[in-house]
Image (tube, rainbow, N blue to C red):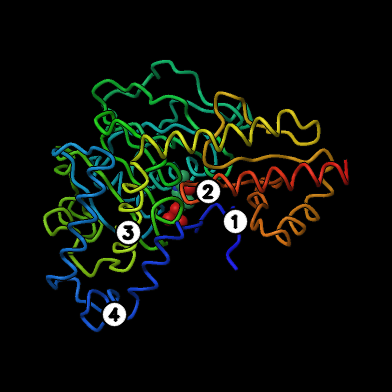
């Protein structure tokens, strides 16, 4: 029996997508083989790859002067690939620090270029986003990097920072496809697939064409946006099954009505959960209201010693993986696109019952 899986990633995938993948697993389009067994250079797979890109472009309204890359290595490899592709040796970089993933990105970038933290949530214990002011950027900074949604802390920007002519780079690992965005505001968007897009192993990069030029000689070819773009992300064998499955997710999103509809649904899911928590008298949501994530909802119990009991009773009731990240404790409900409203309702029902029994 399938459960409501509140894991932060790898996370739930839409049931219709899994059903289709299951039906097609062994004999894809009457070829007598799985899509996993197809050559990435075969006509059949090239059609899968192209359709996925076209659907993604439709969903996000990606302008033609942006390249879409289907890569490997996770968002974490992009922490290195971004400075190596977008910055000359020695050039200053601007980073925003809103939590655990920002810090990992900063640490990696600092291995290659001098990083200035231009806005920081540390003074709020990462419970609020930096003010929406133009941040003082180092002279000649190659780009500004930020994390629109901190998956661990559940801290999300309610605005897209203004950076003038300086390219804005966004780690959208836990938000891409959760609502419409204006791609034109960004120089580069990247996301590991396992939160909201598809299975682990696939990483999406959406990059403005004019940023492909400034590569360094020591840049590994597989990490080079220019080289990958020139080869249609097939410089070497791409993650074919992940690409195919993400393509099915894109078709599912379209069939659901696209990102306007999905965004409204995600907003409604998050509002419903936060409203219940705020009014419960038993649970608390620690993040400042304006910075509350639609995707990852951290909350605490009035009695923290009951956290393990909460998690195990919830799991027994078919609500899996509600433990917070090991670094922060507490509880966290990740409610990405594939989590139906019924899953959120079931969680609220369980929380109400738990509070009544233990509160
Ligand atoms: C999960 C996550 C990452 C790391 O992704 P990997 O694919 O495991 O490298 C980076 N940034 C954010 C915001 C994430 O949610």
Residue drawn at the location 40% of the way across and 72% of the way down:
22
Mark 2 or mark 1: whose residue is earlier in sequence: 1
Relative to 200, say whether 182 is above or below.
Answer: above
Q: Are marks 2 and 1 in contact (CB under 8 Å)?
A: yes
Q: Is residue 321 left or right of 295 when viewed as pictured?
A: right
Q: Which label is found at residue 248?
A: 3
Mark 2 or mark 3: whose residue is earlier in sequence: 3
Residue 303 seen anywhere in this rendered image of the structure:
yes
Which one is in front, 64 or 153?
Answer: 64
Q: Quadrant of residue 107?
A: top left
Local packing at callout 3 (Cα closer than 10 Å; few below 14, some 14-19, many 20+) is many
Relative to 18, say whether 187 is above or below.
Answer: above
Residue at the disc numbered 2 = 340
Local packing at callout 4 (Cα closer than 10 Å; few below 14, some 14-19, many 20+) is some
Disc 1 versus disc 3: distance between alpha carbons?
20 Å
Mark 4 or mark 3: whose residue is earlier in sequence: 4
Residue farthest along the bottom direction in this orientation: 32
Tell me the SS state at disc 3: helix
Disc 1 versus disc 4: distance between alpha carbons?
29 Å
Q: Are marks 4 and 3 in contact (CB under 8 Å)?
A: no
Local packing at callout 2 (Cα closer than 10 Å; few below 14, some 14-19, many 20+) is some
Disc 4 versus disc 2: distance between alpha carbons?
30 Å
Residue at the disc numbered 4 = 27
Tell me the SS state at disc 2: loop
Disc 2 versus disc 3: distance between alpha carbons?
18 Å
Residue at the disc numbered 1 = 4
Mark 1 or mark 3: whose residue is earlier in sequence: 1
Residue farthest along the top direction in this orientation: 133
Mark 4 or mark 2: whose residue is earlier in sequence: 4
- Any atom of ligand 1 within 8 Å of the CB at mark 1? no
């Amino acid at each position: 029996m399938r459960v409501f899986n509140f894991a932060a990633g790898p996370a739930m995938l839409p049931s219709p997508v899994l059903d289709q993948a299951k039906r097609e697993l062994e004999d894809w389009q009457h070829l007598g083989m799985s899509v996993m067994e197809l050559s990435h250079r075969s006509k059949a797979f090239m059609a899968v790859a192209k359709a996925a890109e076209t659907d993604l472009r439709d969903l996000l309204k990606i302008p033609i002067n942006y390249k879409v890359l289907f890569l490997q290595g996770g968002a974490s490899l992009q922490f290195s690939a971004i400075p190596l592709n977008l910055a000359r040796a020695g050039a200053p970089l601007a980073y925003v620090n809103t939590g655990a993933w920002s810090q990992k990105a900063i640490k990696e970038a600092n291995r290659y270029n001098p990083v200035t933290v231009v806005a920081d949530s540390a003074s709020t214990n990462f419970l609020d986003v930096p003010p929406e002011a133009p941040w003082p950027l180092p002279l000649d900074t190659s780009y500004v990097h930020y994390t629109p949604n901190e998956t661990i802390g559940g801290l999300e920007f309610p605005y897209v920072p203004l950076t003038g002519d300086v390219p804005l780079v966004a780690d959208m690992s836990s938000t891409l496809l959760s609502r419409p965005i204006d791609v034109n505001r960004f120089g580069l968007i990247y996301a590991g697939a396992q939160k909201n897009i598809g299975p682990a192993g696939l990483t999406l990069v959406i990059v403005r064409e004019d940023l492909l030029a400034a590569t360094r000689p020591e840049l590994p070819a597989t990490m080079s946006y220019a080289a990958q773009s020139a080869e249609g992300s097939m410089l070497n064998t791409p993650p074919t099954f992940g690409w195919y499955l993400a393509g099915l997710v894109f078709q599912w999103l379209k069939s659901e009505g696209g990102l306007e509809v999905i965004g409204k649904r995600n907003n409604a899911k998050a509002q419903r959960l936060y409203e219940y928590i705020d009014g419960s008298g038993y649970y608390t949501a620690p993040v400042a209201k304006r910075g509350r994530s639609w995707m990852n909802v951290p909350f605490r119990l009035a009695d923290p010693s009951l956290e393990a009991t909460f998690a195990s009773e919830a799991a027994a009731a078919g609500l899996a993986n509600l433990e917070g990240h090991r670094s922060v404790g507490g509880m966290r409900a990740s409610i990405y696109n594939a989590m139906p409203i019924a899953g959120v309702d079931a969680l609220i029902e369980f929380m109400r019952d738990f509070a009544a029994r233990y509160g």
